[in-house]
Image: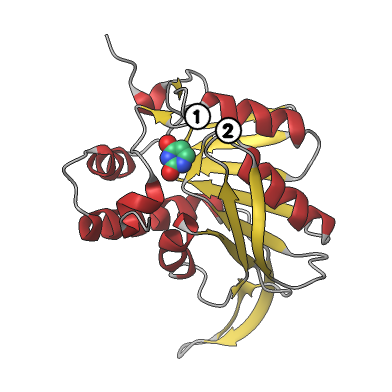
């Protein structure tokens, strides 16, 4: 019987803390429904982009559960009361180019006051090593909560390099949003980021990586599915 990708790692169906890094698999029928359509090879790019956007908003709802807030006094039409608003410094959202860009709108829809930085990273398809080709974000991220967007946690190399960069700039709370994750990538993250303040939020942990570094069953090349191949 083929493994149910949404439950490929029993025990991680909800939230689990493994050696310091937290991983949260969002177990919700709407998430599973949208993910299934994203996986389907017949889904065209416009539909893929729309569904990825909707899926990110659902993941973002879970990912921002611990976003920092502060008390604020307000006046309703009826009375004075106390509520909350997002605390300063504002959260930073960092899509990893290219495919992370397709997750940005879905994320900032829930966090419209967040600032946005950019990290351009590319994976060598032979060595599967990640390298950075563009960086645009504040030098000092002290005290900032950062949400990093990368659709596919495959080997883990890109996300580890990105999160190392964010932590070296002072980020003290990093949440990675991924549409899909491979067990191999999760293990690399756990090993390399042990003890770091990192949470991964994903729609599913799939079965494995294939010999080309693609997630199985996966959804193919997320960038190509969103934007077509730019070769
Ligand atoms: N990157 C992708 O776009 N897809 C995969 O399956 C793995 C890495």
Query: Residue 203: image x %, image y %?
Result: 42, 39
Q: Residues within 10 Å of mark 2 (few under 14, many from 20)?
A: many
Q: Which type of secondary structure does the marked residue at label 2 adopt?
A: loop
Label drawn at residue 155: 2
Going from N to C along the chain, the mark reached first, 2 or 1, is 2
Q: Is residue 72 visible?
A: yes
Question: In the picture, which quadrant includes the C terminus?
Answer: bottom left
Residue 83 to residue 74: above or below? above
Residue situated in front as seen by the camera: 167 or 10: 167
Residue 41 to residue 230: above or below? above
Q: Residues within 10 Å of mark 1 (few under 14, many from 20)?
A: many
Question: In the picture, which quadrant includes the N terminus?
Answer: top left
Residue at 34% x, 27% y: name it. 217
Q: Is mark 2 within 8 Å of ligand 1?
A: yes
Residue tagged 1: 182
Residue at 19% x, 47% y: name it. 43
Query: Residue 98: image x %, image y %?
Result: 48, 59
Query: Residue 58: image x %, image y %?
Result: 39, 53
Q: Is mark 1 within 8 Å of ligand 1?
A: yes
Q: Which type of secondary structure does the marked residue at label 1 adopt?
A: loop
- Circles 2, 1 touching at the beta carbon (< 8 Å): yes
Q: Quadrant of residue 165?
A: bottom right
Taking the image as shown, residue 206 lies to the left or right of residue 176, namely: left
Residue 45 to residue 28: above or below? below
Q: Quadrant of residue 87?
A: bottom right
């Amino acid at each position: 019987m083929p493994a149910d990708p949404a439950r490929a790692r029993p025990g991680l169906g909800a939230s689990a803390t493994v050696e310091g890094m937290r991983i949260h698999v969002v177990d919700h029928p709407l998430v599973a429904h949208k993910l299934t359509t994203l996986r389907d090879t017949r889904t065209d790019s416009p539909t893929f982009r729309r569904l990825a956007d909707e899926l990110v908003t659902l993941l973002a709802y879970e990912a921002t559960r611990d976003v920092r807030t502060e008390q604020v006094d307000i006046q309703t039409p009826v009375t004075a009361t106390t509520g909350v608003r997002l605390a300063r410094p504002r959260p930073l959202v960092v899509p990893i180019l290219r495919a992370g860009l397709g997750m940005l709108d879905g994320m900032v829809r829930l966090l419209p006051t967040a600032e946005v930085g950019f990290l351009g990273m590319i994976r060598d398809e032979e060595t599967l090593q990640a390298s950075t080709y563009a960086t645009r974000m504040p030098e000092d991220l002290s005290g900032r909560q950062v949400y990093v967007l990368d659709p596919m946690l495959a080997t883990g190399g890109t996300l580890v390099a990105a999160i190392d960069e964010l932590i070296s700039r002072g980020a003290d709370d990093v949440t990675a949003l991924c549409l899909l994750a491979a067990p191999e990538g999760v293990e690399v993250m756990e090993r390399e980021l042990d003890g770091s303040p990192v949470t991964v939020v994903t729609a599913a942990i799939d079965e494995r990586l294939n010999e080309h570094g693609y997630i199985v069953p996966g959804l193919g090349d997320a960038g190509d599915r969103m934007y077509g191949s730019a070769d």
